[in-house]
Image (spheres, rainbow, N blue to C red):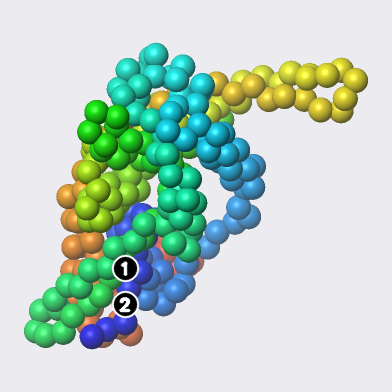
Amino acid sequence: MFPRIYLSPTTLNMVKDCHRCMWDHILWKQKRPQGPFPTLPRAVDDVMKSYCDRFRGGLNPSLKRLAQIHPELGEYVLHQDQRWMNILRDWKGGITKDITLDIPGGGKQQYRISGSLDDVLVRESDGALATIDGKSKAKKPEDGEGEKYYGSQMDTYEWLFKSAGFPTSERAFLWYVIPVSLEDRDPELPTFQIIFDQYIQIMKTDAKRCEVQIEEVHKMICEHPDRTKPPTSSPSCEYCNWAGR
């Protein structure tokens, strides 16, 4: 049996971009080049998580206002178990599933699929789970933007929940916050308040799409049994084109 291969929503999404980049990432631990990571979006994300933590078993006031525009959101509450949320958010833990697939001609390949997420909603009528993910942006998201950029990520969470035996609503909620103005809180203090607008995009998730991506990764692995000979790069991959230059 070959060594276990670790997959995440990020690496699974990579399979549709470039097999060579994915190969380098999951087998050679060679990640795509990355510039300095912006810390402000991460800080906003942490604030949104802390805000949700204050309203376990219900909806925070911001989500309640959005539920007036999107009644489907009003069918849910934030998962009541703070301890479980802390586990799901841990990038070293999260929610995990191990699978073993046969290699044609003999042998087996193990995979561990895992992902950490922002928060979980529970539909009150039947206990079905849905992912809610906070996103900070500079402008209002366009229609279909969630499916385009985060569809694979949300499908992976859906697959992981289903694989663990949880009931799901096959929904994901993207909670966008966009800065719109800056206000002084107290003229006597050197502080100010940034006002954010907010939007919700509701996505239909499909665990089968995640399965297709896992199968495509496995097919790529099986087509290159000699681990020293990687697949070819995608002609449109900007990372491989840069490396070739």
Relative to residue 133, is residue 93 depicted above or below? below
Image disc number at residue 217:
none
Relative to residue 150, is residue 11 depicted above or below? below
Residue 120 position in % (x across, y down) = 39, 41
Report the front residue among 147 and 16: 147
- In the shown orientation, is residue 66 left or right of residue 71? right
Residue 68 position in % (x across, y down) = 39, 14
Q: Amino acid at mark 2?
A: Arg
* Label 1 with label 2: CB-CB less than 8 Å: yes
State the residue at coordinates (31%, 68%): 112
Write down the residue under mark 1: 112
Residue 50 position in % (x across, y down) = 57, 39
State the residue at coordinates (18%, 69%): 219
- In the shown orientation, is residue 8 left or right of residue 169? right
- In the shown orientation, is residue 102 left or right of residue 171? left
Report the front residue among 171 and 56: 56
**Quarter location, residue 77:** top left
Write down the residue under mark 2: 4
State the residue at coordinates (51%, 35%): 52
State the residue at coordinates (18%, 63%): 215
Q: Secondary structure at mark 2?
A: strand
- Label 1 CA crowd tier, 10 Å (few <14, some 14–19, many 20+): some
